[in-house]
Image: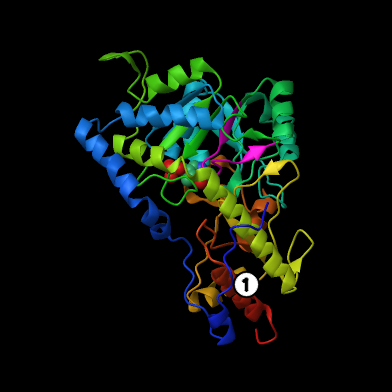
Amino acid sequence: MTTTGFKPKDAVGQAAGQAFGPVPMLDLARQYAPLRAELLAALEGVLDQRQFILGEAVSAFERAAEAHLGVAAAVGCSSGTDALWLALAAAEIGPGMAVVTTPFSFFASVSAIHRSGARAVLADIDPVTFNLSPTAVEAVLDGPDGRAVRALLPVHLYGQCVDWTAFAQLGADRGLTLIEDAAQAWGARWQGAPAGALGDAAAFSFYPTKNLSAAGDAGLVTTNRPELAERASMLRQHGMRVRYHHDELGWNARMDGFQGAILGVKLKYIAGWNDLRRAAAMRYETLFRAAGLAEDGIYPEHGVVLPSEVPGSYHVWHQYVIRCGRRDALREFLSARQIGSEIYYPVPLHRQKALAALGYSEGSFPEAERAAREVLALPIYPEITVEEQETVVAAIADFLGDKN
Ligand SMILES: *Cc1c(COP(=O)(O)O)cnc(C)c1O
């Protein structure tokens, strides 16, 4: 990571001792401003060709995505949720089978498993990375649910890959299909290999807040197995290989031309944006340490525990997530100062009403439950300024200081 690209401090604001203005959680206006002409031209191309669903813009994005990730095939679809379902269905995961995933993720990681007809089985997370723990998965595989498990669906949470060395080993030892939920991890790498190219198949989301985002809903399935790509393409079009001849019960899960066009433009910039996110994450680390707020343990005592990059991993910092013991009070304090923050995720999936039938209870996954109480995501995006990051850290220092 380099420090080039850092903007100089606003000496005037500092000298005047002023508090800097609001810090939004995300500001897409800054991303769109310099791309406006290029994006409008790409959208105009779709209008001129009138290929509104799939079509050339989507194919062009799929081919560019394949080259970018070094995967054999990429299949554009309507959302990250559909990408997860397509990946599972393409791999013929269905009724009577179980899939292991994490309780600490967005709901779709589990709901897509149920949509495939399979049953979700959960395992606890690693408290340092917040990612699915391979040790906990192994314990599940050796337990009563283990025999039904056909696939593992780890999530590269917050932009950092799961311990793929361990998951690849587990998959090989037990003959399991590996599906990556890479919705938050475009550009992340594990020992040099990109997220999306690690498992049998992977699912990306381009929801507008993701690090690579469309202007609406869109998703992508990637795979190095051509037969899975062929099945995903068939399933996203109502199970059709030949028009109006339906081989299987698929669904309408296609990508729109406009989204393909937007993504084709943004793909050219994502590597640079990820580098800026990495620089911003490093800057938070420096600022928190300089302010004496960073604690070295796994759980917070008086200060905050900072997120870290695992050796061998290339983190793209989709989110910068700290732990804080008085998380809810901190969040209110930041809101009062117009500093954005978010909780991903306040309720672990096994405590969701819709998933009560999974049969878990409070205490089933203590690490996920504790994380849900302590995590706070701070503003991070490629365009965030030094002043904004200083404002965030200064506010947290005030909160943790004596007067609170
Ligand atoms: C966003 C997200 C999804 C779902 O993607 P959509 O495009 O919103 O359907 C799935 N899994 C994870 C981990 C996500 O962050």
Measured as percent of width and height from the top left, residue 79 is found at: 40, 38
Q: In the displayed orientation, state which residue is furthest to the right.
A: 297
Instruction: Tell me the colour scheme of the image.
Output: rainbow
Instruction: Name the kind of residue labelled 1 in the image.
Output: Val
183 falls in the magenta region: yes
- Residue nearest the viewer, comparing 15 with 120: 15
Q: Can you say whether 372 is above or below 174 in the image?
A: below
Measured as percent of width and height from the top left, residue 270 is found at: 50, 44
- Residue nearest the viewer, comparing 70 with 117: 70
Segment tinted magenta in the rendering: 178-190
Residue at figure coordinates x 61%, y 50% from the top left: 361
- Residue nearest the viewer, comparing 287 with 153: 287
Measured as percent of width and height from the top left, residue 247 is found at: 35, 13
Residue at figure coordinates x 34%, y 45% from the top left: 38
Q: Is residue 221 left or right of residue 163?
A: left
Residue at figure coordinates x 76%, y 44% from the top left: 311
Q: Quarter of the image holding residue 119?
A: top right
Measured as percent of width and height from the top left, residue 47 is found at: 21, 37
Q: Provide the residue designation for mark 1.
A: 393
Q: How many discs appear?
A: 1
- Residue nearest the viewer, comparing 32 with 122: 32
Disc 1 element = helix
Residue at figure coordinates x 64%, y 55% from the top left: 369
Q: Is residue 252 visible?
A: no
Q: Can you say whether 2 is above or below 400 in the image?
A: above
Within 10 Å of disc 1 (Cα), the crowding (few <14, some 14-19, many 20+) is some
Q: Is residue 375 visible?
A: yes
